[in-house]
Amino acid sequence: MILFLTLISLCFHHLELIKTVPVDVGPKSVYFSPDGKYVVANCLYGHRLNIIDPVKMIVIRRISVPGEPVECDFTGNGRYIWFSLYDKNEVCVYDYELDSIIRRIKVGKVPKILKVSPDEQWVYVSNWSSATVSVVDAKSFIVVKEIKVIRKPRGVVFTSNGDYAYIANMGGGHLTKIDVRNGHKKLTNIPAGVTPRHLVMTRDGRYIYQTNNLEGVVRKFSVKDEQYMGKANVGKKVRSCILSPDEQYLFVCNYGDNEIGVVDVNRMMQIYTIKTGNEVNGHPIGVTISPDGDFLWVSNYRGGVNVYRIVREID
């Protein structure tokens, strides 16, 4: 007797709003800690980091900071939160266990996105106005190099082995490739369409997904070939994006439409949208996803943080 095994896969169906978490004014970005124990909302105009309990979905800490926090990343499995203050030209390090800012580091002008390398040796900071990337030694907290790029650098990703980094030059329409292991040398500039903004890489390092802000598209980039493989039309003023844990779907902040879009990355097609608010309480700008892949968290720049259940159906 021959037994046939049927593989059952769960496909994305829709997003169901569970709660809007009230936070301080101007939540610019939202991130899960690596250990999944808390969520950080960087509240620009509130001059605070809001720490949220992901189970209770309430703010459990409001951390006053000396400026306007934009983006963050983590070291020590979430013990240390690195965040950029774009009005102070600084990166700060907050120790979660000590509940204290332990370092303030001067970087280039108007720092935006920062990213920690896979081995946690380096922190790359994209400086919007000085058109540089500050390379910070994550152990000594010292800036070891300023890499000059084209114009208005934004998104940063490292390859999975940490050998290279790619920087989105929003003002120059290029990706800049940097050799991390050999002195953080600038290697090539790759044409990337109009206003490339946010980058996210697959776990195996094969592909980068890139939002192009003014074009309203998401592009798929092959790291091996250094070629673009296709694009999906999404919404107006495309901002942050994140992959689902199975890397089949991309959740995209369509800031101008007050929507979250869902892109099937195999077909490179937007298959779903949901309104996050309106001109008063909307404008989705940051997005993160729970480690189990069940909940999507969206920061609305003019509102709070929306939490959605990701509903799936059997394919």
Image (cartoon, grey):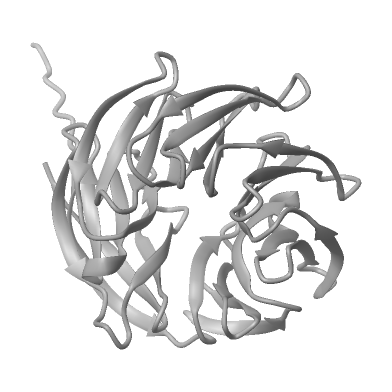
**Which residue occupies the extreme right position in the image?**
140
* Residue 99 % position (x, y): 80, 75
* Residue 309 screen position, x and y as percent: 29, 66
Residue depicted at 81% across the width and 45% down the height = 138
Q: Residue at x 83, y 74 (%)?
A: 100
Q: Residue 66, percent across and down?
A: 76, 78
Q: In which quarter of the view is residue 70 placed?
A: bottom right
Residue pictured at 34% horizontal, 53% vertical: 213
* Left or right of 197 on screen, residue 270: left
Q: Is residue 55 visible?
A: no
Question: Quarter of the image containing the C terminus?
Answer: top left
Whether 293 is drawn above or below 207: the answer is: below
Residues 115 and 81: in front is 115
Give the quadrant of the N terminus. Answer: top left
Residue 93 visible in the picture:
yes
Q: Quadrant of residue 74?
A: bottom right
Viewer-closest of 157 and 215: 215
Residue 183: x and y, percent?
78, 24
Q: Is residue 32 above or below residue 185?
A: below
